[in-house]
Image (cartoon, rainbow, N blue to C red):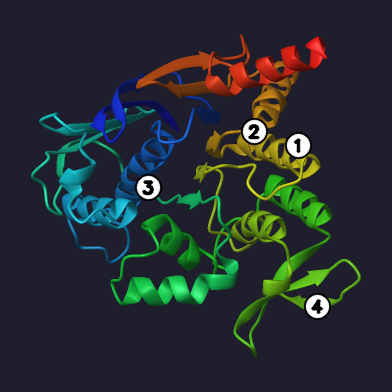
Amino acid sequence: MIKSISIDSLGPIPQMKADGLGKVNLIIGPNQSGKTFLLKALFAGMKTVEQYKRGKENRTDKEILSDKLYWTFQASELGNIVRKGDSSMSFTMESDKKETLTYSFGPSAKKQANIDKNTFSPRSSNTVFIPAKEILSIRDIILEAKDENQFGFEEPYSDLAKALNRTQKGKNYNSFTQARDIVSSMVGGRLEYNEDKKEWQFRDNDRKIYEVSTTSEGVKKLSILDILLGNRYLDNNSVIIIDELEANLHPSMIAKFLDTIFMLAESGIQFFISSHSYFVIKRLYILAHRKDVSLPVLSFDKGVCSVSNLRDEMPQNPIIDESIALYKDEISL
């Protein structure tokens, strides 16, 4: 599990440090404040330590990292995402086993990053990044663009598209089965792969089959988690990054989704969730108190990242401020 993250001079982030990270971690803040930069930097780091020395992989960790950063941020040059006016950026993550990965690059970097320290042991578990937009209906297009080395779909998209394959070898966890049943109940069915047509289809609880393109984006988004739990791509040491969890989901689905996330977190999976929704924050606040668990919040605002804990308090952030302002406006009517 990742216990701490620190960043210097990455995009809109001048500096941040978050210690004591938990099984569920929330990232909030206005647009362009640094949330997605943090998630992408973490994703690139996690995929590097996972792929390094795995199977037949013969690239160095530096080569893997440079490739991940280039295709994750898709800037024409890596140096373009260094904070303007600064000499270099750096990212550090540390695990609960005291393993450390630190990487950096300067504003003149083209496609190469530096690994300053890597003490992570070989890692068999997988990290997955679930973006705000669903990808099932365009999975083949994403994979084709990646195969042809074309910009357009960032590395989290192509990585997820590759992960959405048929059943792999691995352990079947009871908590995963329960989570899949909850998701299936939420969306009213389950996605299945049609071997003859070589495509995903949605089978509802009445056994009726629909093309995946005819299902809602919310159903497809939740079904992605169902597939990853069912095809053994994830295990109880995986990391799941979710950008804008609330996108395309009805509030009742958001609540059940968060309940499911807590169930999976109790089994060992670590979550990093970004959100613009007061509803998400409030639901997580209730869950943190109800279950008496630590739930760190990384709150970005005006170039500053403050760290608090939902078990202790609601964070100071424009999302909270706007919700309070709306409540005051309602009271004044």
Residue picked out by circle 4: 209
Which of the two discs, 3 and 2, labels the residue nearer the N terminus? 3
Give, as a three-letter code, the residue at label 3.
Arg
Residue 329: x and y in percent read: 74, 15
Is 118 or 246 nearer to us in this picture?
246
Q: CA distance from mark 4 to mark 1?
A: 27 Å
State whether residue 2 is above or below residue 309. below
In the picture of the structure, the residue carrying the numbered disc 3 is 123
**Mark 2 or mark 4, which has the lower sequence index?**
4
Disc 3 and disc 2 in contact, CB within 8 angstroms? no
**Residue 83 picture quarter:** top left
Task: Answer left or right for 101 relative to 194.
Answer: left
Instruction: Tell me: residue 285, above or below residue 141.
Output: above
Residue 173 in view, yes or no: yes
Q: Are marks 4 and 3 in contact (CB under 8 Å)?
A: no
Which residue extends farthest front? Answer: 333
Residue highlighted by disc 1: 255
User: Which badge, 2 or 1, comes first in the chain's sequence?
Assistant: 1
- Mark 4 and mark 3 lie on one chain; the one further toward the N terminus is 3
Q: Secondary structure at mark 2?
A: helix
Is residue 301 rendered to the left or right of residue 74?
Answer: right
Q: Secondary structure at mark 3?
A: loop
Q: Position of residue 36 (x, y in %)?
A: 42, 40
Mark 2 highlights which residue? 266
Residue 320 drawn above or below residue 271:
above
Closer to the chain start, of discs 3 and 1, is: 3
Residue 252 vs residue 51, the one in the foreground: 252
Label annotation for residue 186: none
Query: From mark 3 to mark 1, how far is it between C-alphas?
Result: 32 Å
Structural distance between the alpha carbons of marks 3 and 2: 20 Å
Residue 319 in the image, given as x and y percentages of width and height: 58, 24
Amino acid type, residue under disc 1 in the picture: Ala
